[in-house]
Image (cartoon, rainbow, N blue to C red):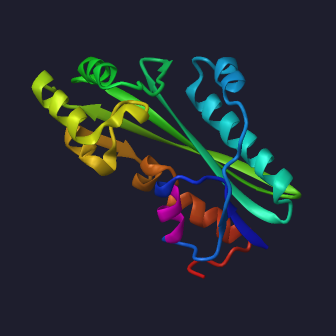
Amino acid sequence: MKLLLGSTSPYRLAQLKQICLNFETYKAEFDEEPLKSKFKDQAVECALALSEAKAKNALLRYPDHIVITGDQVAEFEGKILSKTGSKEKSIEQLLEFSGRALSLHTAITLAAKDSSQSFVVPSHFHFRKLERAEIEAYVDFANPIDCSGSFKIEMGGIALFEKIETSDFSSIQGLPLIELSRRLRSMGVELFK
């Protein structure tokens, strides 16, 4: 059976290439806002619902594939975070996070014609105390306005934290490769091919 990554994210694409060489990509097109509104302050449920909706969308177009879709939802003190869209709002957000923690929930759905399974890998980010000048320099450097939480791990964001707690560090970029590999093998997918 063919494999389809239901994402055009360059990060997820590079991640999947670490374990699979032959797969196609597809970006699911649908309005996410109704689901986000439905699960307003339920981060895990929201991430799962978005991931599952993307899988259903992709299977309509690629019914003979095993589809991998995912979504990430960040939460801070029980509230779902959205992308800031501006440097000023990213600076404000990081100032609020200073010395505190937030969670990122990475949901993945594996779906085929006759079966579907989903899972979530949580990651907890403990920010160190941050000074405004350092935050401003980081935001100028990484421009994280398109990221919930206003940081990019792959763009120096790692330096903002005291520690990160997760069972699978690869989940932070979008695909938890440890669990994904296990589940793909259980579906008969040969890795590294």
- Image x and y of residue 139, in percent: 24, 33
**Residue under the point 70% across and 34% down:** 49
Residue 13 part of the magenta segment: yes
Quadrant in the rendering for residue 133: top left
Q: Quadrant of the N terminus?
A: bottom right
Give the left or right position of residue 85, taking residue 22 as reference. Answer: left
Is 67 or 184 nearer to us in this picture?
67
**Residue under the point 69% across and 74% down:** 189
- What range is drawn magenta here? 12-17
- Image x and y of residue 33, in percent: 66, 24
**Residue under the point 58% across and 73% down:** 20
Tally of marks: 0
- Image x and y of residue 147, in percent: 42, 35
* Image: 19 above or below 80: below
Q: Quadrant of the C terminus?
A: bottom right
* Image: 56 above or below 84: below
Give the left or right position of residue 79, taking residue 126 as reference. Answer: right
Give the left or right position of residue 186, taking residue 56 as reference. Answer: left
Quadrant in the rendering for residue 138: top left
Is 104 or 60 nearer to us in this picture?
60
Q: Residue furthest right?
A: 114
Secondary structure predominantly adopted by residues drawn in magenta: helix
Residue 147 part of the magenta segment: no
Q: Residue furthest bottom?
A: 193
- Image x and y of residue 55, in percent: 74, 48
